[in-house]
Image (cartoon, rainbow, N blue to C red):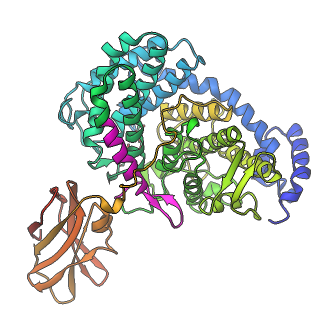
Amino acid sequence: MASYIPYWNYKDSVCDFLQTIFPQVIMWRSLRLISALGLCTSALAQSSTVDSYMSTESPIAKAGVLANIGPGGAKSSGAYPGVVIASPSTTNPDYLYTWVRDSSLVFKMLIDQYTSGQDTTLRALIDDFITAEANIQQVTNPSGTVSTGGLGEPKFNINETAFTGAWGRPQRDGPALRSIAMITYANWLIADTNETYVIDSLWPIIELDLDYVMNNWNETTFDLWEEVDSSSFFTSAVQHRALRQGSALATAIGQSSVTSGYNTQANNILCFLQSYWNPSPGFMTANTGGGRSGRDANTVLTSIHVFDVEAGCDGVTFQPCSDIALSNLKVYVDSFREIYGINTGIRADQAVATGRYPEDVYQGGNPWYLASFAVAEQLYDALIVWSNEGSLIVTDVSFPFFQQFDTSITPGTYSSLTPTYSTLTTAIKNFADGFVAMAAKYTPSDGGLAEQYTRSDGTPTSALDLTWSYASALTVFNARAGNTSASWGAAGLLVSPACSTSEAPTVPVVFNVNATTVLGQNIYLTGSVGALTDWSTTNAILMSSADYPIWSTAVTLPANTQIQYKYIIVDNSDITWESDPNNEFTTPTSGITTLDDVWR
Ligand code: NOJ
Ligand code: NOJ
């Protein structure tokens, strides 16, 4: 590989030439018909493939989004006005529901398009969205009423009634994302001299969500993939963003009574966010529970959804070009290199198909379009900021990321006038384009974007016409074109010096379980938080049998937190779980708790 870089120009011209004869040069490369050249990752050929994908896919994606919004959307009949369906698919999976997360991310994109002047026709649709979500907020559902937790309900029927089936609930990213979308609109309305409407109509809706975030961010939540009940990086990060923006909006419209509460909790969340960092090998653990590797598109999505072009490469808010976010991107991407057939043979410094997380099995656990686009978007965002700043910085943390593009790189600051800066940014642009090209390669000829494309041969699969997939295409295209969304106040934020995750309040808990065992068997404890090994069976906590048949242990747990746990019997490598459901309790804010359980 060492000889690779010096041949750039040669390769570019070869590939350029091939590109003119074979527009599908990407395809040719994958077929290895020209593998003798060993090289046709030609930045130029790929770049023009992505250019043309952008121009054909953009209108298709936009139409795809609009088709999925009621009442006029071509594929969303039955959806109330402003209600976004996740996908028209009604079987395997049935996505003909409206999710607060998907809807809010989709409308954030539409609101950005409207407020930036990119599409001035969207006003009525945005107002429909606001009305729909205001209605949905008031619908009593399995998570509660509007004032008892109902705002955390993840999904509703498309006629704005409650979905009452079993589900992973609550999902506390929803209210945060919804308020971020609405605050973006509110800020524009204020600048457009429509402050009265904001104060009278919009603020009460936004405030409900922000108060929910302020009061509940510290509670466990199902993650954005609706599977793991713990704390989740994406959720915490968007909650932080929502409270910052909410506080600024409140100040702007004279609602200052809420600001100190919002600011206090925003500071606390910012503090908590730092604790997800995993220094070796340098990535954000997506969830505090779940018992997985922790590498997850959750974190890449976080970086693009908290991007603030004014915030430089700040790591504290996980900006796309921060050293930790770049290191995280590499660790996340690399976790898919070996597991998907379609990634076989792709060089270690080239883009691959990526999905939610490597352990995923949902609907085949395939690559997701929105995950592959998110990687590219993070990199395009980074390129925008480096260009604005006129330099980029390589730290010891981001070193492995940059080393992919220049094996001789050393940590330091590289001004945009240096050849190193050009080498790196050119290669990173190419790398980013590779992720779009990957999704493009597996986009069917009609441009439809499903949820996933199969790991074996890239056939679109799972929900067809996923609204969020289309929205993610539009946002990555926008970033590639150098466009950014309005700032949200991330610039200059600092983690309070008093904030240290080790100071998060904890309480001692004694676990006693009465369990009859035979010789050779031991009882272990495992559960939903890190101190209970995140449901690990291999690292579970061995209990003492000194008072047999009472098995006992003491553990320090986060205070004021809902905990789930089970005892397991381990007999050599045989594991017997206690029967369902999980044991559950909430730790107090202080004092010793003793749990006296009986094995079941
Ligand atoms: C449905 C959810 O939408 C999906 O994210 C999850 O993976 C499956 N349920 C399995 O829990
Ligand atoms: C499953 C995904 O995991 C979840 O994030 C999404 O909200 C739903 N599908 C609906 O698209």
The reply, left or right, for residue 241 in relation to residue 36 is: left
Residue at the far front: name it.
497
Dividing the image into 4 quarters, which one contains the N terminus?
bottom right
Which residue is at the front of the view, 3 or 346? 3
Q: Quadrant of ligand 2?
A: top left
The reply, left or right, for residue 528 in relation to residue 36 is: left
Residue 469: x percent and y percent?
53, 35
Residue 509: x percent and y percent?
16, 67
Q: Residue at 38% across / 51% down in the picture?
A: 271
Residues shaded magenta: 262-289
Q: Residue at 79% across / 48% down in the picture?
A: 422
Question: Is 494 part of what is drawn in magenta?
Answer: no
The reply, left or right, for residue 41 in relation to residue 288 is: right
Residue 528 to residue 433: above or below: below
Does the image show residue 583? yes
Which residue is at the front of the view, 271 or 78? 271
Residue 64: x percent and y percent?
54, 25
Task: Tell me which corner region of the image, top left, top right, bottom left or bottom right, holds residue 18.
Answer: top right
Task: Tell me which corner region of the image, top left, top right, bottom left or bottom right, holds residue 511.
Answer: bottom left
